[in-house]
Image (tube, rainbow, N blue to C red):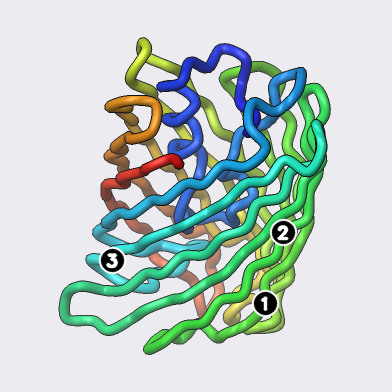
Amino acid sequence: MRYPSYSSAFATLAFAIAAAPLHAGSQPDAAIPLAAEGSPEIPIGIEAVTGYRSEFIYRGFNLGQNVIDFQLESEIALTNNLILSVGGWYATETGSGDFSETTGFLDLRYEWTHWALGIAASYHSFTHSFFEDGLDSGLFVTWAPNDDIQLTAGGYYDDGPGGWYGKLEGNWSRPLGDKSFVSLLTGVSWVDDYYLRSGWNDAYARFSYTYAFNDRVSVTPFVGTSISLDSGPASGSDYLWGGLWFEVNF
């Protein structure tokens, strides 16, 4: 698994969860940070993340409230530059609603110096949701000008609704010592024939604080928001939510 060059064992664990786990409004392509120069530290790594969020906002749509989710991901360094990530997640409402989602995903990316280029695919199965089951796939490119910043552009086709989703996203992160970490994710999205929406979709942000108990276990409280940019008949609402992730690395 490769990480930014400043990382201690605590900071690497914190960055992995702070970047974008578990449906944080984007695809899993940003879940693992870009490479530092040199060989991978380990060829295979496994992460398990479980969490709670007050609102389950995905691509500007509110899919549920009081949701508990779980993600398991394995990352395999096929070469010094070619990285494969595979995994899945399950999410379910815990209150009066009965929404749930089961998803499997994989992405393959090539990393060099400050860049990463990859393909991502995920299959989503929903129950009691207006979202339709289907395969979501696309391309992404990420540029990391330094250890603190990542900028990502991605485009995806979802054959559930038969529409397109695109995003421009930035992630800033900074260690606060050996055991804690802050991260700010911001972005805008654009859609075409995506659940009756077309054009600019939403602007979103998430701020998180991670504390690593050791080099394998961390906890991350976070707050997020999504602001609708769509003015059509299927325009969304503005949302504010909070939650907590708990992560274990194997």
- In this view of the protein, can residue 199 be seen by the observer? no
Q: Look at the image and tell me in which quarter the C terminus lies.
A: top left
Task: Indicate the amino acid at tag 3.
Answer: Val
Give percent across and percent down for residue 70: 37, 61
- As measured in the structure, the alpha-carbon distance from the residue carrying label 2 to the one carrying label 3 is 25 Å
Please identify the quarter of the rendering in which residue 6 is found.
Answer: top right
> What residue would you read off at disc 2?
120
**Given the image, on which type of amino acid does mark 1 rest?**
Leu
In the rendered structure, which disc, 3 or 1, sits on the residue that comes first in sequence? 3
The x and y percentages for residue 14 are 42, 30
Residue at the outermost left position: 96
Mark 1: secondary structure: strand
Using a 10 Å C-alpha cutoff, classify the residue at mark 2 as few (fewer than 14 neighbours), some (14 to 19) or many (20 or more): many
Mark 2 or 1, nearer chain start: 2
Residue drawn where x is 69% and y is 40% of the image = 152
The residue wearing badge 3 is: 67
Residue 135 circle label: 1
The residue shown at (77%, 37%) is 116
Q: Position of residue 224 (x, y in %)?
A: 36, 46
Q: Position of residue 73 (x, y in %)?
A: 53, 53
Category of crowding for the residue at label 3, using alpha-carbon neighbours closer than 10 angstroms: few (below 14), some (14–19), many (at least 20): many
Residue for point 70% across, 28% down: 40
Query: Where on the picture, by quarter, is residue 205?
Result: top left
